[in-house]
Image (tube, rainbow, N blue to C red):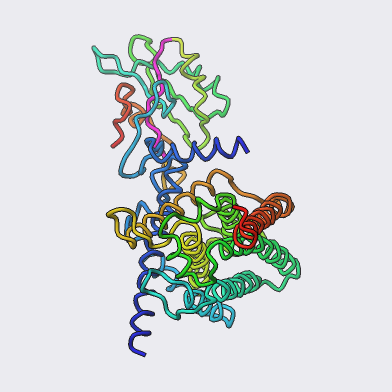
Amino acid sequence: MLGLIKNFFIALGNLFRKPRTVVYPKERIIVPERSRGVLHLKLDPDTLEVVCTGCGLCSIICPRKCIEVKKSMAEGGKKVLEDFRMDLSSCIFCGNCVEFCEIDAIDMSYQYQLSEYKKEDLVLGKSELIKPSSEIRDFWK
Amino acid sequence: MLVILKKIFFIVLILAVNMYICEYMGNKLTARMELKRGYRITRVASAGFPMIRLVKFLSTDSRVNIWNFFIFLLSFLIWSAVPVTGSLVMIEEDYSFLISFAFYIMLIIAVLLGSSRSPHSNVFSENCKKLLINLSFIIPILLCGISVVLVNKTMSLKEMVNSQYEYWNIVVQPVGGLVFFVSMFFQLKMLGISRKSYMSNVVETGKEGKGLGKIIEKVSIYMTVFFLIAILNIMYLGGWQSFYIIRGEVMLALKFYFVFVMLLLMDKATGRIDSYKLMARINWKFLLPVSIINLIITFGFLVARDIYNLV
């Protein structure tokens, strides 16, 4: 009986509280800090080149094996990233790749709206992984 | 003849407008009680959503069976003896209390038996159980009604309101009013006032669905809600008696929506009840004894006052 009365007042109070949901396509919430979205390849601010050297540690550590890294040797014996492919359809957003990266070349962006019509479109290349910003959380308007 | 047609038109208009408002309010308020901004349909179509839902239902299926027709007829016939306001009553009867409840019981039987369209015998037995429990909830209501009849010395609903000019019956019969409200709430809970409040997965009454048959079912459930609220207003809350400078009709509307919102809140507070035994236990162990004790006390008080002049 006491529980019933308590529930009654909770339901009554909820009428005057702010709703917790948003009308999704029209309104969006700001994603919480440190949320894990799509991978982001960092750029060197001076040279504007990809920091990643293509060592492939992330693809080895990935539990779902959804990262594919191709590297090539540039002039002077320097390792250069040729291609970086990520399959979002099998990624579980565990963040292992970011944690194990030795040169801190990748991080996770806040991009979370990932639905596509075709499964092939969920495989992202190097150019697409450079795009997502890690700074602005509600960029995806 | 013209006067009766005019009255019927106004009664149907009032019921239709109330149904529209209650459908909108019910959906919006129950969503807000769950801290949601509104269910999807109320967000998309805002205030026009009951109309859109009606058209959507009609466009899907327009078949009706004889049960639907019978239910539709009864859901308007229950208003034949109930005064909507002081001057808006279709047929003025001295025994309107009994006539209205006879129609109400018939409607409940029709709604619950009409919803067992499935050929499975399981559904029918479920419905019969539900029907019997629902009918058993009418007994405390009738007992409380008899107490009010004894207090006001009339069986006419209109005269009951007129006799409350000094103070409302809820002041004289607070326990009766409480029992009436609780048993009314349980009846509506079984019929389904809001979504997810129907009792069993097997019985279809109150569930989401489409087609003209479902519209009629929904209308009949709203009619039972309105009927019980109207009877509660008339018997305990003073009906259309004016309150200081507030007109009687305004007071009636205020009381109507107050009781409706209270029912919605109670519906959310209790959640979904799936156990028949619990409902039956509440009825037989709480509502019935209390209403019988209330009747005995009222009867004893009236005998002591009127026959022996003790009070």
Query: Principal SS element in the magenta part?
Result: loop
Tell me residue B290's x, y (percent): 67, 51
Of B300 and B304, the residue lying toward us: B304
Magenta residues, as a range?
Answer: A103-114
Between residues B279 and B88, which one lies in front from this camera angle? B88
Note whether B136 is above or below B172 in the view shown.
below
In-image side of B250 versus B199 (left or right): left
Position of residue A18 measured from the top left corner of the image (x, y, whole percent): 37, 35
Q: Residue furthest bottom?
A: B1
Residue that protrudes farthest toward the front in the picture:
B309
Residue B166 visible in the snapshot: yes
Asked whether B37 or B169 is in front, the reply is B169
Where residue A11 sits: x, y (%)? 48, 40
Query: Which residue is found at the position 60% from the left and 36% from the top?
Result: A3
Magenta includes B310?
no
Query: Among all residues in the image, which is located at the extreme left?
Result: A46
User: In terms of depth relative to the viewer, which is nearer, B132 or B173?
Assistant: B173
- Residue B23 seen in the current view: no
Image spot of residue A91 (x, y percent) = 51, 31
Q: Is residue B261 above or below residue B247?
A: above
Q: Residue at x 52, y 66 (%)?
A: B224
How many marks are shown on the rendered structure?
Answer: 0
- The answer to whether B126 appears left or right of B170 in the picture is right
Q: Is residue A96 left or right of residue B59?
A: right
A111 inside magenta stretch = yes
Figure quadrant of residue A43: top left
Which quadrant holds the N terminus of chain B?
bottom left
Residue B58 picture quarter: bottom left
